[in-house]
Amino acid sequence: MAANGLGLGLGLDWIGNNLTRLTDEAERFLNESTLRVAITGLSRSGKTVFITSLIANMLAMGRGRDTLPALSRMMREGGEERRIRSVRLEPAGTQALDWFDAADKLRDLAGASPHWPPRTSDLASASLTLTVERGGPFGTWLPPRRVRLELLDYPGEWLLDLPLLDQSHEAWSAATLELLRRPPRAAIAGDFLAFLASLDPNAPAEEPVARRGFMLYRELLATARDRLGLRWLQPGRFLVPGPKGDSPMMWFFPLPGKGAPAPGSLRELLARRFDAYRDDMRASYFDPWFARFDRQVVLVDALGALCAGEGAFEDARHAVEQIARAYDTRSRSRWLPGFSTLKRVAFVASKADYAPEVQRPAFESLFRAMVGGGDGGRMVNHLAVSALRCTEEGEARPGEPPVVYGVPMGEQRRRPFRPGHIPAAPPPPGDAFWRRPYFELPVFRPPVIDPDGREGMPHIGMDRLLAWLLEDAL
Amino acid sequence: MTNRPGKTSLGGNQPGWADEPQTATRGRDDALRASFDASLDTAMGPALLEPEATGGLIRHGEPGSLGVPDSAGKAAGWLASLGSFGAAAALLVLGSFGLGLGLMIDDLFNASPVLGWLGTGLGIGVGATMLWGLGREWRALRRLDALEDLARTLREAPDRAAPPRALIRWAEGVAERLPEASAAVAELGRASTMEEARGLLRTGLMPILDARVKALGWQSARQVFLTAAVLPSPALDAGAMALIGLRLMRQVAVLHGVRPGAVVLWRLLRRLAFSAGLTAGVDLAVEAGVEQLVEGHAAKLAGGAAGAAVAARRMTRLAALCAEACRPVPRQ
């Protein structure tokens, strides 16, 4: 009898658990949506700080701080009093990727000796859950919606490998060598080009030669990045190898030659390694993590490129154009090319706090003309944003150029920074503007912020960007 | 399809923070902006200038505040009016009763001083009992407010802050009613940060509470099932359901450290009716679908007891929703 009672109890529990599971699944299906947001950008364009700022400001907004005024205004538009009830950073769960530790990054930026996060060396992800009230006449009678934002951080250098996926070693070598023979790269490519000139492409494969060529080419890429401020540097993993480190498949370099390489030749070895590298990037990173995104943010250090000179500016423009094209191709359905999950793309000029407010419209206009965009089927926007505002507006004095105040890293007193003339459109090649000397933007110390993130992170334009990016999802 | 920022519905270049420093450049018109551009030598390059005599680190102040809605939700206008109407009716009844008592005592004194004093004693006893009841209600409301304050603190406190004493007190109160939660409460007391405390709360204490709530829900569900299956009249069914439901709400509220006075129960009912959990629409449609499923299968098994199965199911749902309204941390 007792056994029967126990059996009945277990049966009822089983039914109850399954009904609960069923209702939970149905509720999730009806009330929850997920947006995958790709935060893309070249190296040192500020992706990590951007994601940290997004998370910190969203969390602070969920706690009642008006950290993103344009977003809260957008929620109130049309007479609908929709509000974000709460924002929650999802726990790490069982994901295979590194967890993006926003609190740790915030502590780096806000500590007693604040510093910028180190270069990102591997993929990391974070997810936010926004609980949003429904609008409309029946909004109060309906349960709130949950919008999940999935964010991905990764080394910006790797993004440059995206266009490689559709190239062969032959095509890549031709394009790369053409770039190396032109300024500004020609000034630093002498050793590598001399090494190439000494090689017979049809010579038999020799491992020491392949490795020497790889080392020379990698040094060339590092010099181009550090001395000339260039960003179009392929392959990306040569500069940031990631957790796998250097592996034999990476020991290749561009080598001229047309047609099929002779079997057993150096060119054939390099082509095989190029293919292996490309396939590994596709299988390990691009297919699993970069294939499907609903929104994309492309960060570009446009002011840094402008100050670095014509070569760096043109290089950054070319890199962004290539990446945007590669992304566009990959986000489209293989069977229905007109269909793409990527609905909105925001091109963002980072470090807007380096430009005084009076020059920001010209800066945005320059940036818009620099990167272009706006192909069919999706909305494109161009904004100047600072994820963490490190400067204050300087006082305008008649006859003097506008400045912003910032505290350079390692110093305690603020100094005026003058970005100089910012044209509203890219100056034509050879223009007098480009005769200005190379200038590397100073690194300013982060402002004084609450290490616990209670007040979010001061910014410029993050709210406008998020309001536009999430307009149709909230 | 390019969407230029100046032409979006979101307005112009608004500052991100409410305390944006007011500088001379803010709000300049286009002509002034053009004069700025004109004053700039196009060949003038960027430069980091010499430090100024004054000015230390950059501080941007704090952002403005948003009115975050209370998780309990606000009552609709008509319900608030109903509350005012109820308060007015209660005042009328109590006032009439007081006036009637005064007249009665006056009549009793006219008849006999002994009867008058007896009547006075009765009146004082009734008044004292009512005041005691009001005091209980007031304490119960204070307890509910404290729980809401705790929920707000848990929601807003940064991860690295120390757990508030109120959380430990609340958890210890739960452990007094649920001895099986003692270990989880002791562990919670050892948490040094809010991040740890939230985690321990969600993984240690709340599951034990939820299991107990579930058991209470099933117990009431079984009672409702049997009562509805046995009682001959639908009106009696409804009455029994209401009584068992109210008792269930009281049990769940007590479990979570809420004193279930009449006003508190009213507030809980109102919160249930207007919180996200029990609102109509999508959620209710899902529930209705599940109930149809239950009803269909139960009808095959138990004929007339099909309605009873649905009523029982609603008791488990009520327990879960009531627990949701009393939890200091929202379910994830």
Image: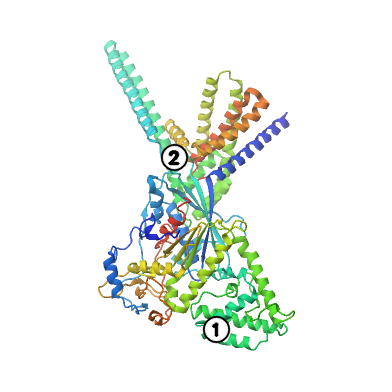
Indicate which disc residue A181 carries: 1
The residue pinned by badge 2 equals: A140
Total marks shown come to: 2
Chain at numbered mark 2: A
- The three-letter code of the residue at mark 1 reads Arg
| Residue furthest to the right | A263
Quadrant position of residue B17: bottom left
Q: Position of residue A357 (x, y in %)?
A: 34, 67
Q: Position of residue B96 (x, y in %)?
A: 32, 21
Identify the secondary structure beneath mark 1.
Answer: loop
- Residue B287, compared with residue A110, is above or below; it is above
Q: Confirm whether residue A97 shows in the render.
A: no
Q: Nearer the viewer, mark 2 or mark 1?
A: 1
Q: Position of residue A402 (x, y in %)?
A: 31, 72
- Residue B277, compared with residue B241, is above or below; it is below
Indicate which disc residue A145 carries: none
Q: In terms of depth relative to the viewer, which is nearer, A158 or A256?
A: A256
Q: Confirm whether residue A185 shows in the render.
A: yes
Number of other residues with Cα within 10 Å of mark 2, as a class: few under 14, some 14 to 19, many 20 or more: many
Q: In terms of depth relative to the viewer, which is nearer, B93 or B134?
A: B93
Identify the secondary structure beneath mark 2.
Answer: helix
- Sequence-wise first label, 2 or 1: 2
Tell me: A405 left or right of A179: left
Q: CA distance from mark 2 to mark 1?
A: 65 Å
**Residue at 46% in and 35% down:** B273
Tell me: B144 left or right of A37: left
- Please determine if labels 2 and 1 lie on a single subunit: yes
Quadrant position of residue B311: top right
- The three-letter code of the residue at mark 2 reads Thr
- Residue A333, compared with residue A79, is above or below; it is below
